[in-house]
Image (tube, grey):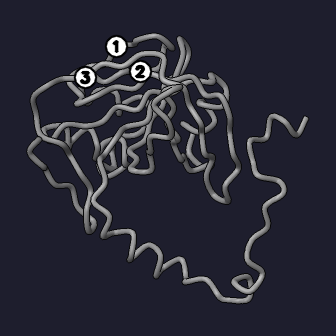
Amino acid sequence: MNQHINQLLDWTPNTELNEKPMVSAEEHCRGMRHFAMGVSTITSGDNKARAGLTATAVCSVTADPPRLVVFVNKGVYASELILKTGALCVNLLAGEQEEVAKAFAGMIKEVQGEARFEYGQWDTLATGAPTLQGALANFDCRVVKVFDESTHHAFLCEVLAMREREDGEALIYLNGGFRQIPQ
């Protein structure tokens, strides 16, 4: 069974560092605000239900095989739906898609659940997960592993389909606000 963990089980942390205190959650969050991160909507769904959220915690893992890791708060419905379907789509937003980001981040109070999909035009690629048309890039993925990381699930995904556009500005999140960055 251990051969499927992909963790260095014979590695041990530096015990001298174990005694040192960590920064507070508040300090950590303040520091993380300085990271300029691309903004994505993470979506999942099937014929019965769709869900999504705005996220910046997406990272390329490897190009061969094509893998991403996506961190999703366990407390949101999208996390439950990703676990159920085994699929998700990372929709990397363009600058003009800030309203989509706000809708999926819960920043437009009256817009919740399925109503979020009224922002933007949606279709599907390989997995059936909702895919935003006009995004800078869409990464349609199957989940191959799930890691339990405190308040979040870390979904290790393999990219089954990808779509991109050549024009447009990137939407990023920095210091508590959305910004557009020319490509």
Q: Are marks 1 and 2 in contact (CB under 8 Å)?
A: yes
Residue at 60%, 50% in the rendered image? 75
Locate the N terminus by quadrant: top right
| Residue density around tag 2, few if under 14, some if 14–19, many if 20 or more, within 10 Å | many
Q: Nearer the viewer, residue 53 or 66?
A: 66
- Label disc, if present, on residue 164 of the rendered structure: 3
Tell whether 41 sits left or right of 64: left
Disc 2 from disc 3: Cα separation = 15 Å
- Residue 159, image x and y in percent? 48, 23
* Residue at numbered disc 1: 123
Three-letter amino acid code at disc 2?
Answer: Pro
Residue at 63%, 36% in the rendered image? 80
Q: Quadrant of residue 90?
A: top left
Q: Is residue 56 visible?
A: yes
* Residue at numbered disc 2: 130
Q: Is residue 21 above or below residue 68?
A: below
Of the two numbered discs 1 and 2 on the same chain, state the one appearing first in sequence. 1
- Residue 158, image x and y in percent? 54, 26
Disc 1 from disc 3: Cα separation = 14 Å
| Residue density around tag 1, few if under 14, some if 14–19, many if 20 or more, within 10 Å | few
Locate the C terminus by quadrant: top left
Disc 1 from disc 2: Cα separation = 6 Å
Residue at 75%, 48% in the rendered image? 7
Q: Quadrant of residue 139?
A: top left
Q: Report helix, strand or loop for mark 2.
A: strand
